[in-house]
Amino acid sequence: MSASSDVILARMMTLHPKVIDLTLDRVWRLLDLLDHPERRLPPVIHVAGTNGKGSTQAMIRAGLEAGGDLVHAYTSPHLARFHERIRLAGSLISEEALTEVLDRCYKANGPDAITYFEITTCAALLAMADTPADWTLLEVGLGGRLDATNVIDHPALTIITPVDLDHQAFLGDTVAEIAGEKAGILKRGVTCVVGPQHDEGLDVIERKAARLGAPLLVYGQHWHVTTERGRLIYQDERGLLDLPMPALAGPHQILNAGAAITALRHLGRDEAACHAAVTQPYWPARMQRLTEGALADLARPAELWLDGGHNPAAGVMLADTLRQMPPRPTYLICGMLNTKDISGYLAPLAEVAKGLIAVSIPDATATIPADETAAHAELVGLPSKSAEGVAEAIAMIQTQDANARILICGSLYLAGHVLRENG
């Protein structure tokens, strides 16, 4: 009996280097042993950025698939199951196919050190190279320049969504430094769609693009997107589109939609594809309303929402989203990792929430203890308590206000736990 994907993934964890040094050497070595699957992919659209990568990619996929194209997609991290990371020709990878490519990569790599993300990215590239499709969407895991996905010599298109502070230990302490790492996905002669940026970040991206002769399609210069009378209005040099508001919740999704539409129009897609991009994407744990399941039933009649954003910019976007929703007392259930700027994330949310229940993230060694999260929340002005788990936190809020809006937030790892617990 062959090992399951979970067993092989656990084995891969044992190959992890003692210290993570961002480099592509380990990836190139394994790809060479696998006969370079990255050279056999359908045309690649490579997406980097701090926030909005997944949403933008989901919209592009919806637009391409609406025209009948078969699309591979690679994202990270997963929420409930690893299989979510790899979508082959429109469908999540099967257990059989995942087990097969993981096993091939594990055997090819041997005992040599390699990170979990690096070896699983190689497995994703192998699966996508072996499956016919029209497009490959690759989402950067960390940074860009030295990310394991940055092995495509000549993608069809690159995209850089908004760049902000996150992962400073690996990418740098300033927006300019981080933008330099994200700009590492730029390739000579390959067009890049650039979402809204801080001035210092855009300067870095533009300088790198000029050195490489990479044409840019920059928000505010080459394309514009806004709202008018409850509609999304997009404009570029080809003309104006009047579209429905994005199905994904939050004002920031208007800008993500703009980047996706720009990408689709650059690829020659029509207005129907752009319409599908804003109306048909599915991207869980990004202001997702939970209406069915064990936790949703427990919360009723309160509203239950889920979001996986986890850095200060995500906190701002989440607060803006809540301001635009119909008035309702809002309470947060929050768990975060100790690698994140918890005060920076919570400060904008303190302006729109009445209180917070802190939880530790189950099975996450880097979780901030619930009491510590509660203490940080108090410091930014959020009345806070701690709970043993999400179900207990929901019950505590229910006792206080049965008709509340409950938002579970702070980490994609917590979001994954919630989706599994909700069933």
Image: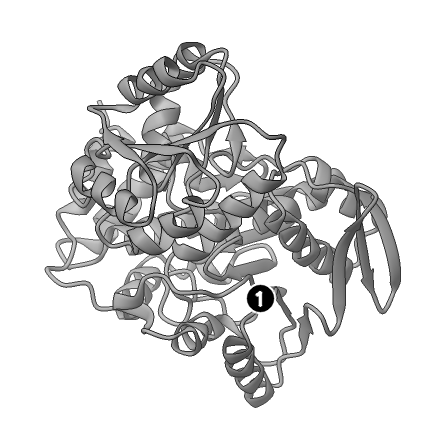
- Residue 175 falls in which quadrant of the image? bottom left
- Secondary structure at badge 1 equals loop
| Viewer can see residue 423 | no
Which residue is denoted by mark 1 in the rendering? 155
In this view of the protein, which residue sits in the foreground, 379 or 47? Answer: 379
Residue at image location 47% in from the left, 35% down from the top: 285
Residue at image location 83% in from the left, 43% down from the top: 229
Q: Is residue 158 above or below residue 295?
A: below
The answer to whether 22 appears left or right of 354 in the picture is left
| Viewer can see residue 184 | yes
In this view of the protein, which residue sits in the foreground, 350 or 153? Answer: 350
Q: Amino acid at mark 1?
A: Pro
Q: Is residue 166 above or below residue 89?
A: below
Residue at image location 29% in from the left, 54% down from the top: 340
Name the spot of residue 68 as percent of width and height, x first.
74, 39
Q: Is residue 188 above or below residue 74?
A: below
Name the spot of residue 110 as percent of width and height, x first.
17, 53
Residue at image location 39% in from the left, 25% down from the top: 419
Local packing at callout 1 (Cα closer than 10 Å; few below 14, some 14-19, many 20+) is: many
Hey, which residue is sitting farthest bottom in the picture?
A: 211
- Residue 109 falls in which quadrant of the image? bottom left
Hey, which residue is sitting farthest left in the picture?
A: 18
Q: For the N terminus, which image quadrant?
A: top left
Name the spot of residue 421 as percent of width and height, x first.
33, 19
